[in-house]
Image (cartoon, helix red, strand yellow):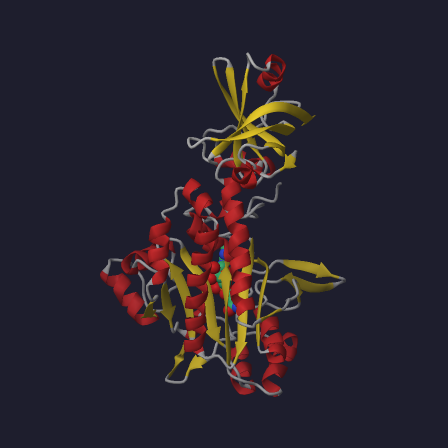
């Protein structure tokens, strides 16, 4: 007897097969029971008719949702079933029968209740396809860079200084000294890029942000790349290629899941297949003012502004050349206008907001020292970073993508907390 996973069921039509999983849900129609069986790869309908197998029928009728089981039976084509087939059950071996009703109902429950039961919630509804899309997005990011000859590298999580400003740092005691949870691996990737040329990684990033929005978590996964000899223009071209590749790869691989999530994948592909829009920060401020937004030059854009820009262009848009006062110390200034940084944020359409932040990096000791001072940062913790400008400095650029932001957009999810297995938010550290 073939032991199969549900994703392979269609290749075994006519066979007697066994699968191991959980009883997701069931319904009855007179003397027939329909069991929704799940195993992480999909959902398969198991059918048992009382007249044919009264004992099995009685057992199946009694078992509660989420009973873990080994099910055997014949696989038959069924065009009405989402998987295209069903299993005529002959045996059902119970591994463990739940001691009570499964807390997650397959109807609306409050977000607070669902988040308190996140460890169980992830088994149900949209959560399973979302987590499979997440897997595909991580993999696509890595294969993009692997195919282009980048070297995967790692950055530390425990750090002695800030990368993205001091207001969002998680501080901890490190044997009597202060240490911080990393906000980004960027500074360390700049060092490995000087060793390896072009590098990338995916790692956790921590932001002690007090923002309670549908786009912020305090722990997220940042996907970053750093390239020696790349200028600002080359940096943006690479980001555009990456986002297009990533969306296309995920849609191709997880089409069925995105259909389950009711995501309009044609829209998504149309958005990324056009050349991305680009707008100077100053022009973006003017455009927003014309649309009635109360922004002035030097302001950070909030969710309504990002949404308006996304809607205006209907495709990803780079906002370029921010005033240096808005951005961190490490960004190179535009030689044509030193009040502006050679930086860009990439804004996703449909209101999903900023998905990438990046820039060309400062590459001389003089500029770096001046910019540290302007940002009132001490030089001692950054000596190693200054060294990179002392020994064979080259023009270089990089960027960081918030994977949860991208996955939220690809899935069409309404909140970032749905696309990470265990979201961390201001008032949420459980489970
Ligand atoms: O724009 P950020 O702060 O840029 C950096 O950290 C740079 N050091 C990256 C680099 O150049 N290597 O963060 C990068 C991205 C943002 O564009 C956003 O997508 C995501 O990380 N992000 C968050 N995602 C979820 N929750 C939060 N609190 C986030 N903060 C930033
Ligand atoms: Mg940013």
Which residue sits at x=44%, y=60%? 355
Nearer to us in this view, 312 or 326? 312
User: Picture coordinates of residue 271 (x, y %)?
Assistant: 34, 58
Residue 184 in picture, x, y percent from top left: 57, 64
From this viewpoint, which residue is outermost toward the right?
175
Q: In this rendering, is residue 109 above or below 263? A: above
Image quarter hosting the C terminus: top right
Task: From the viewer's perspective, tell me whether residue 161 is left or right of residue 340.
Answer: right
Q: How many marks?
A: 0
The residue drawn where x is 41% and y is 77% is 233
**Taking the image as drawn, is residue 43 in sight?**
yes
Q: Which residue is drawn at the image coordinates 41% and 62% (left, top)?
A: 244
* Residue, far left: 290
Residue 97 to residue 158: above or below: above
Residue 129 shown left or right of residue 203 in the figure = left
Q: Nearer the viewer, residue 117 or 200?
A: 200
Q: Nearer the viewer, residue 19 or 113?
A: 19
Q: Which residue: 51% across, 57% down? A: 403
Residues 236 and 310: in front is 236
Please indicate, yes or no, whether residue 165 appears anywhere in the rendered image. no
Q: Position of residue 301 (x, y in %)?
A: 37, 61
**Quadrant including the N terminus:** top right
Judge from the rendering whether residue 130 lies leftward or rightward of residue 280; answer left or right: right
Name the residue furthest front: 14
């Amino acid at each position: 007897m073939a032991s199969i996973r549900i994703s392979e069921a269609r290749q075994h039509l006519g066979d007697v097969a066994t699968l191991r999983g959980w009883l997701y849900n069931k319904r009855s129609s007179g003397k027939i029971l329909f069991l929704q069986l799940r195993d992480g790869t999909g959902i398969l309908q198991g059918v048992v008719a009382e007249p044919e197998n009264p004992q099995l029928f009685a057992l199946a009728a009694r078992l509660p949702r989420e009973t873990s089981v080994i099910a055997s039976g014949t696989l038959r084509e069924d065009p009405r079933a989402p998987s295209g087939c069903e299993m005529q059950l002959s045996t059902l071996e119970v591994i463990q029968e739940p001691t009570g009703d499964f807390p997650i109902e397959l109807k609306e429950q409050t977000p607070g209740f669902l988040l308190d039961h996140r460890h169980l919630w992830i088994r149900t509804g949209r959560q399973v396809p979302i987590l499979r899309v997440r897997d595909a997005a991580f993999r696509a990011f890595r294969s993009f860079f692997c195919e282009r000859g980048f070297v995967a590298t790692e950055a530390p999580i425990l750090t002695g200084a800030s990368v993205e400003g001091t207001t969002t740092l998680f501080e901890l005691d490190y044997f009597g000294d202060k240490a911080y949870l990393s906000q980004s691996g960027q500074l360390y990737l700049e060092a490995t890029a000087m060793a390896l040329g072009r590098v990338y990684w995916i790692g956790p990033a921590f932001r002690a942000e007090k923002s309670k929005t549908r786009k912020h978590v305090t722990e997220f996964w940042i996907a970053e790349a750093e390239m020696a000899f790349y200028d600002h223009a080359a940096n943006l071209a690479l980001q555009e290629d990456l986002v297009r590749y990533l969306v296309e790869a995920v849609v191709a691989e997880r089409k069925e899941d995105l259909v389950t999530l009711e995501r309009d994948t044609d829209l998504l592909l149309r958005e990324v297949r056009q050349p991305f829009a680009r707008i100077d920060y100053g022009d973006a401020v003017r455009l927003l003012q014309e649309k009635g937004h109360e922004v002035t030059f030097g302001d950070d854009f909030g969710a309504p502004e990002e949404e308006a820009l996304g809607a205006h262009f209907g495709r990803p848009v780079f906002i370029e050349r921010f005033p240096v006062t808005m951005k961190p110390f490490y960004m190179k200034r535009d030689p044509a206008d030193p009040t502006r940084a050679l930086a860009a944020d990439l804004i996703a359409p449909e209101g999903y907001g900023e998905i990438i932040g990046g820039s060309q990096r400062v590459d001389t000791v003089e500029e770096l020292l001046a910019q540290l001072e302007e940002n009132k940062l001490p030089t001692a913790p950054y000596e190693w970073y200054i060294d990179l400008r002392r020994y064979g400095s080259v023009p270089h650029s990089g960027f960081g993508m918030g994977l949860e932001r991208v996955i939220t957009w690809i899935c069409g999810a309404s909140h970032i907390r749905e696309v990470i297995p265990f979201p961390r938010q201001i008032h949420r550290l459980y489970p």
